[in-house]
Image (spheres, rainbow, N blue to C red):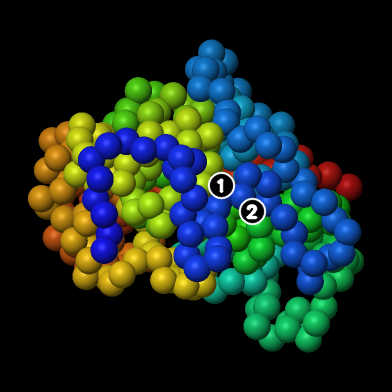
Amino acid sequence: MLHSRAEVKPAGDAARRTGDREATWPHNASIPNNLVAGVGTPYSDDFKMTASRAADRPRDYPHRHLLGIEGLSPADIVGLLDRAEDAVEVSRQVEKKRATLRGRTQINLFFEPSTRTQSSFELAGKRLGADVMNMSVASSSVKKGETLIDTAATLNAMRPDIIVVRHHAAGAVHLLARKVDCSVVNAGDGIHEHPTQALLDALTIRRNKGRIEGLVVAICGDILHSRVARSNILLLQALGARVRCIGPSTLLPVGLDRFGVEIFTDMRKGLDGVDIVMMLRLQRERMNGSFVPSVKEYFHFYGLDREKLALAKPDALVMHPGPMNRGVEIDSEVADGAQSLIREQVEMGVAVRMAVLEALGSHLPNT
């Protein structure tokens, strides 16, 4: 059974095991040998960002790539959110086309299936005037045994300006960024990071709450397999929010307490007094074994319904990165209710990706 305990329990107190596997959320993303041999991890061990407020909020983005929330300062984050605010207004106009990236080439390279993220990046690039190409990995040379480095060299020879990459392996996007001459955006790498999802979530929260600092945000569900959870933890803490992680012990990674979050295995206790409830789906495609006894029991303890939502603040808002599994992690009444921001998140996704592409475009050479 799923045990629903009342106490706050650090995830590192005991290992969660399924068979002989330890349920971990690696603090260093490794690159599998089938991608490239002999390449070390490009990440540091320090993932906790400062929560100090940025007194100055420059709009200039100082980085060539967007590979993760880790490494961004609060000012970097706020600058991207401010750009995205402008992009929201552009997207709501009749004439949405801009010439910011006119003449530039954007390649969307997705090694995993995606509907929302890929279409969002495509729309964002086209609204900024870029020539956008979606690369179908299912029919590409990757399926014929080509390594990621070979793919990077091939794409680099086409002289793109921006490559948007989603890959099933943590660290793959960082590797590719070291092998190409253009800017690279991480659209999700394994269970490591999904920076633009965290940015759009932050934008949605800020537009509805007026701030992020001081808010209590509960991230609930399959945290072990979630790159969205990781990026959101880093971003929200960087901007001064308190973050709670809620889920069964089998879906909480060992070492999660190192991120400075509050950890609950009892959802009812964890939702007490929160401002934002962020639900995550069960990522069964990443599961190798049984992590929950049954969907019915999982929903009973960890599915968000009206009864559980009532334990949060009266003005609490509900979010979900999608796609939703109704009746598994969220009830339809809540997903479609007045407190739900799920549809708004989709709109903010286009605006945030426009902001990211525009920011990276400012670093592109003119010759």
290, 195: nearer the viewer: 290
Give the percent coordinates (x, y) of residue 305. Answer: 16, 55
What amino acid is found at the position of numbered circle 1 in the picture?
A: Pro
Q: Earlier in the sequence, mark 1 or mark 2?
A: 2
How packed mark 1 is, by other alpha carbons closer than 10 Å (few <14, some 14-19, many 20 or more), is many
- Would you say 16 lies left or right of 334 here? right
In-image side of 253 versus 5 (left or right): right
Local crowd size for mark 2, using a 10 Å CA cut-off: few (<14), some (14–19), many (≥20): many
Spot occupied by residue 360 in the image (x, y as percentages of width and height): 69, 43
Q: Position of residue 201 (x, y in %)?
A: 41, 44
Q: Which corner quadrant of the image does residue 8 belong to?
A: top left
**Amino acid beneath label 2:** Asn
- At x 44%, y 24%, the residue is 240
Q: Secondary structure at mark 1?
A: helix
Image quarter (top left, top right, bottom left or bottom right) of the N terminus: bottom left
Q: Residue furthest top?
A: 55
What percent of the width, then of the height, locates residue 84? 49, 40
Which one is in front, 329 or 198? Answer: 329
Q: Which residue has dot 2 on it?
A: 186
Disc 1 versus disc 2: distance between alpha carbons? 7 Å
Q: Are marks 1 and 2 in contact (CB under 8 Å)?
A: yes
Residue 336 makes an appearance in the image? no
Residue 41 in sight in this render: yes
Q: Is residue 93 above or below residue 151?
A: above
**215 with respect to 200 (left or right):** left
Q: Secondary structure at mark 2?
A: strand
Which residue is drawn at the image coordinates 31% and 56% (left, top)? 343
Q: Residue at x 84, y 65 (%)?
A: 36
Residue 195 got which mark? 1
Tell me what residue is drawn at x 62 percent, y 58 percent.
189
